[in-house]
Image (tube, helix red, strand yellow):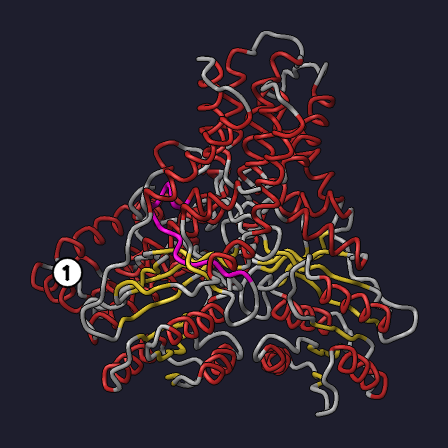
Amino acid sequence: MFDNLSEKLQRVFKNLRGEGRLTAENMEQALREIRVALLEADVHFRVVKQFIEQVRLKAQGEEVLTALSPSQQVVKIVLDELTKMLGGHQSKLRFANEPPTVVLIVGLQGSGKTTSAAKLARVLTKEGSRPQLVSVDVYRPAARQQLAILAKQVNVPIFEGTLDQKTPLELARGARKEAVQTGRDLLLVDTAGRQHIDDRLMQELSELKEALNPTEVLFVADAMTGQDAVKSADEFHKRLGITGVILTKMDGDARGGAALSIRTVTGQPLKFVGMGEKVDALEPFHPDRVAQRILGMGDVVSLIEKAQSVIDQKDAEKMQEKLLAGDDFSLEDFRDQMKQIRKLGPLEGILKMLPGIGGLKELKDAKFDEKELTRIVAIVDSMTPKERGNHMIINGARRRRIAKGSGTSVQDVNNLLKQYGQARKMMKSFSGATGLLGKKGGKFKFPGMPGIPGF
Amino acid sequence: MAIQTLFGSASAEPNLLEKLKAGIQKTRSGLVGRIEEVFAGQKEIDADLLEELEYTLITADLGVRTVTEILEQIRLGLDRKSTGGAAEIRGLIERHLLEVLVASDGPMKPVSAPPAVIMLVGINGAGKTTTIGKLTHRFQSEGRQVMLCAADTFRAAAMEQLQVWADRNGVTMIRQTQGSDPSAVVFDALNSAKARKADYLIIDTAGRLHTKENLMAELDKMRRTAQRVVPGAPHEVWLVMDATTGQNGLEQARKFTGAAGVTGIILTKLDGTAKGGVAVAIARELNLPIRYVGVGEQIGDLLPFEPERFVESLFEK
């Protein structure tokens, strides 16, 4: 949906070759493109303006390097500046000198506080802390129950309060007391969501802060937030002095420009990003990756990490050994690879993460039929072991049976066999020479990819 | 003023307009307040004024494209020297926004035989469950019998949250166990609503990001299931969207419409400082009307959206 910024800049600078320096004039159009890209990514208007000025200053007078094209050079300046503004490297949680360390979790309604609290408890337990959870959200129906269920899932004790502890302050004090008594070194306090202009509820947070003296006040913000992010973050910061930010719902396709707005307006570091609904989906914040994402430039590091995390290393090695030994690439292997690719998630999402491919015109509007992968797996599953071992025996009658069994057509089966044939040929050329990722070709490529329409 | 409901029109309670105004007061004081400032301070229309206007419109989350278009019209007007002054610019912006909103607006398709089935969809934390609590209250005050379907079987305590709203409104809620197939709950609930002759059945679905293909497919399945029990169901599919949502809202609306056949938008949390401007872009690109706006945490804080009044209120002093 968005034109890739690099692509746009390439167009802008097409005529710049031969000029010696980046000047105010030849930068003007480029800056306009950068501006639009940032606004489309929901970076606040004023922040964009400030940022553009910075880039202008940085770029002006720089020599057009021979090693990089002018557009690459500008992209580099923009990326470097953006990464710098997002705030150096990931920062850790701070702990109090005297336990328990109290972490107050605050934010607007629906930003993801409760889920983040549980995720944080899990991460910190893994790092050797002994956290205790408490929800002081006495307003939203079943909010405390929600945290209680999540606490169980992450196996962290929760303070549920007594009948006479009705206010957030009473609950928080009770939880802190229990944390001390049970030797917990960390208390995570999940608060109710509130509007930053709700004076009464903001006052309640100030009181909680005063009573608990938290080491960290974490502001939980939705990555999809638009221009309003500056206002809410600013108000929370003014009234509470937040010490860090958790950016949630980053597993969607929002560009996350709010991150830059919040960082700029509060000056506080982004510490974690929420990457999914499950309790293990919390990751440290990487400024460089988010910078690339804001600019719509793909995220190769994330893709490789994702591939590494979902692709079963043992399976991959097994297959590699098999191929190196000169064994045939069977239909079962073919199917397994399809399954591996499927695990990476929606293909369109994967392609977006690849900077080179994401910008290709012919791929931009290509529709990737996710069902294709499922169909391939179903077809192979409908074959007999013998057929999977030797595709040559699959005659017309067998094809009809396989089609019926997998709920596809004979044509689908034919297509699959053709794709398999191509993949097999490719595997043969690989075998004995290189590993699964095709190091020889120097490209990150899955064998079998030609079988997927669109590639 | 009459409100369009699934069973024809109903007359509005007298204080509705006041509430609506109060509800979008923040929208007004934000977006329009600043336009007014722009107008008050400057008489001449120059580059500075245009930039101020751009600032005002962009920070309302209207989106670069919509804003560029509006400003282009103003520039054209300037060139033809037909734009007389601040008041005229305001009129121009007002007309533009209204055109977009009115074009996408239309009455809901009437439901001939109850139950009218309404499904609420949206990303996590948009405010679906709370909105259902408020909708139930609204339909009941129109004298209708409402039933709820707890099809968010995924999120911890989601069913309990909806149960609280069901109890508050004194209506029946159909549920199964945590983790059960949402389509199965829909099937049960629709049959039950038919048997009890309920006027409305409102389905609460789990929040999901529009990028999760399998979860989006689940919505489609729920829709097909509903269709099998009550032909034509779900009669309305409303996308619940947080007013703080930025430009990603458009993509959200696009994907949810593709998978779940969204028929309208409910814009929540308009009681903050966010303007919900992306809804204009959604109305424009996808022709989806905004049906209701959420303006607070109380049960009565859900109001019908009316384009004329919305834009009108935007520019009222």
Q: Nearer the viewer, residue A327 or B206?
A: B206
Magenta residue span = B282-295
Instruction: Return the x and y of residue B4 as percentages of the image width and height.
Output: 32, 60
Q: Quadrant of the N terminus of chain B?
A: bottom left
Residue at horizontal 47 percent and vertical 13 percent from the top:
B81
| Residue A73 appears in the rendering | no
Give coordinates of residue A10: x percent, y percent.
51, 22
Q: Look at the picture and state if A359 lies above or below B192.
A: above
Up/down of B258 relative to A18, above or below: below
Q: Residue extending furthest left? A: A397
Residue drawn where x is 76% and y is 67% of the image = A205
Q: Quadrant of residue B66?
A: top left
Residue B285 within the segment the image draws in magenta: yes
Judge whether residue A163 can be spotted in this image.
yes
To which chain does the residue with label 1 belong?
Answer: A
Closest to the observer, B172 or A369 = B172
Looking at this rendering, what residue extends furthest in the right direction?
A97
Residue A102 sits in which quadrant?
Answer: bottom right
A295 to the left or right of B103: right
> In the image, is residue A338 above or below residue A25?
below
Residue that carries the numbered disc 1 in the rendered image: A394
Q: Could you say where residue A308 lies in the image, as x and y percent from the top left? A: 54, 56
Q: Residue at x 71, y 17 (%)?
A: A60
| Residue B229 falls left or right of residue A441 | left
Q: Is residue B50 magenta?
A: no
Element marked by disc 1: loop
Residue A11: x and y in percent read: 48, 20
In this rendered view, identify the residue nearer to me: B129 or B15: B15
Q: Amino acid at mark 1?
A: Ile
